[in-house]
Amino acid sequence: MRKNIGLKIFAGLVFAFLLVPLFIIIVTSFGTNSTIQFPIKGFTFDWYSKVFDNEAFMDSFFLSLQVAFFATLLALIIGVPAAYSLARHKVFGRNWIKSFFLSPTIVPGLVVGYAMYQFIVIKFQFPIIQGLFLGHFLICLPYVIRVVGSTIEQLDFSIEEVSWTLGCTKLQAFIKVVLPNITSGIFASFMLAFINSFNNIPVSQFLSGPGVTMLPTSLMNYIEYNYDPSVSALSVILMLGTIVLMYVIEKTLGLASIS
């Protein structure tokens, strides 16, 4: 009994420790102070309007949104069939291939960013936009393969084999039988890959260039010379956006499971 109480107290302290910084960020975003200070002196919404009036923030936000979305979409197009092949067929060196695809999630982000900089910028001299897209695709792909692959491995392949006997080709069986049963994994991988791409700092930092920056890079550059509450306001907006995205994904997964 005492042990359970101790665990609950510990869990509560950890939860509070995580929530306090978020609470401070939210409160300071409404402060009238010219710099981020807690507690705040007054209440205002001006810092939120300044976020939307900041062209650097807005340009980098829409660029991050586009890069993250299309990089994740391409990762799904390539990653879902790849995950299926690794889970369904006895590919030679399958474990090594899995480890290779998952390496961007294991290696430190700074190392991944620098390696991509050497490969994409120095070696092949990709244009900045294409380089950002390629780099973010490479960090999205492991999440798709890992999450979708785990979902496929739990699938009863006898259902697919029955569809073959009923006249479906392997492609038709994959589209009509496999895909509807791994919808939850696809949506979950999309959410993880998109959020990690959108918030990624090392790859965005290394692959950005003059006049072309992702939102994390733009925010880091801003903080270097400014420390006003608009940073807190932007952080709150990003948190709300993430919560909305997770809610939409959860509702979509719920509808998919019902159908």
Image (cartoon, helix red, strand yellow):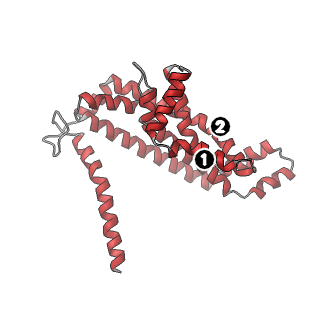
Q: Earlier in the sequence, mark 1 or mark 2?
A: 2
Query: Looking at the picture, does residue 213 appear above or below residue 1?
Result: above
Relative placement, left or right, of 166 versus 46 is right
How busy is the neighbourhood of tag 2: few (under 14 within 10 Å), some, or many (20 plus)? Answer: some
Where is residue 178 shown, x and y percent of the image? 71, 49
Nearest the viewer among 117 and 83 is: 117
Type of amino acid at the residue the image marks with label 2: Ile
Q: Quadrant of the N terminus?
A: bottom left
Residue 99 is marked as 1
Relative placement, left or right, of 259 versus 114 is right
How busy is the neighbourhood of tag 1: few (under 14 within 10 Å), some, or many (20 plus)? Answer: few
Determine the image quadrant of residue 155. Answer: bottom right
Q: Is residue 259 visible?
A: no
Where is residue 141 shown, x and y percent of the image? 58, 40
Nearest the viewer among 172 and 122 is: 122
Secondary structure at numbered mark 2: helix
Which residue does the numbered mark 2 point to in the structure image? Answer: 78
Relative placement, left or right, of 15 versus 156 is left
Nearest the viewer among 58 and 196 is: 196
Where is residue 17 shown, x and y percent of the image? 29, 56
Report the Cα–Cα distance between label 1 and label 2: 17 Å
Relative placement, left or right, of 55 versus 157 is left
Residue drawn at the location 60% of the way across and 42% of the way down: 101
